[in-house]
Image (cartoon, rainbow, N blue to C red):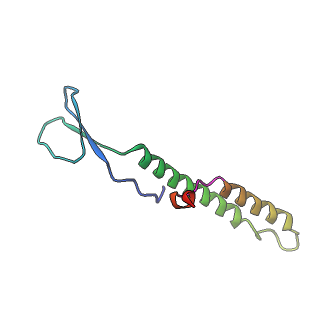
Amino acid sequence: MSKATMPSPSAYLYTTPSGARVVDLKRVDLDTPGLAISELITTTQAEAYADAVRREALEEAAQACEARIGTGCPGIGTEEYDQEAQECAQAIRALIPPTKNEAEE
């Protein structure tokens, strides 16, 4: 499970049992039977959250590659395998999307 934090809602969608819908910027708890309230986020928030989840998953994959370095059997040369594991980790990290701060630099 990801440790990335879901963004706070930017708006709320209220749907009545009859299908009528209203969007409001603040949450209001109405005592209406069958009223569904959905939290909405912006596209920018959704993209930032998706990038955070992606960064986390890719970093975990890179670390899994690096965990293989130096785990060969004693007496068997593992330098080639260690180099491949390091290259794998570097290739995975190259896929990690930049953070907003990194993109602005």
* Residue 91 figure quarter: bottom right
Predominant SS along the magenta part:
loop
Residue 6: x %, y % from top left: 40, 53
Which residue appears at 76% of the width and 60% of the height? 87
| Residue 40 part of the magenta segment | no
Front in this rendered view, residue 26 or 15: 26
Image coordinates for residue 26, horizontal then vertical, percent: 22, 48
Q: Residue furthest front?
A: 105
Relative placement, left or right, of 85 versus 99 is: right
In the picture shown, does residue 15 fall above or below 41? above
Which residue appears farthest toward the top when viewing the image? 18
Q: Residue at x 74, y 57 (%)?
A: 88
Residue 42 vertical position relative to residue 34 in the rendered view, above or below: below
- Say if 88 sits above or below 10 in the image: below
Residue 69 rendering spot, x and y as whole percentages: 75, 68
At x 64%, y 57%, the residue is: 61
Asked whether, in this view, residue 58 is left or right of residue 72, the answer is left
Q: In the drawing, does residue 29 fall left or right of residue 10?
A: left
Point out residue 51 in the picture as x, y percentages from the top left corner: 52, 51
Q: Which residues are magenta?
A: 95-99
Image quarter in which the C terminus is found? bottom right
Q: Nearer the viewer, residue 73 or 69?
A: 69
- Hey, which residue is sitting farthest left in the picture? 31
- Quick check: 38 above or below 61? above
Identify the residue at horizontal 82%, vertical 69% (top origin): 73
Q: Tell me how many marks there are.
A: 0
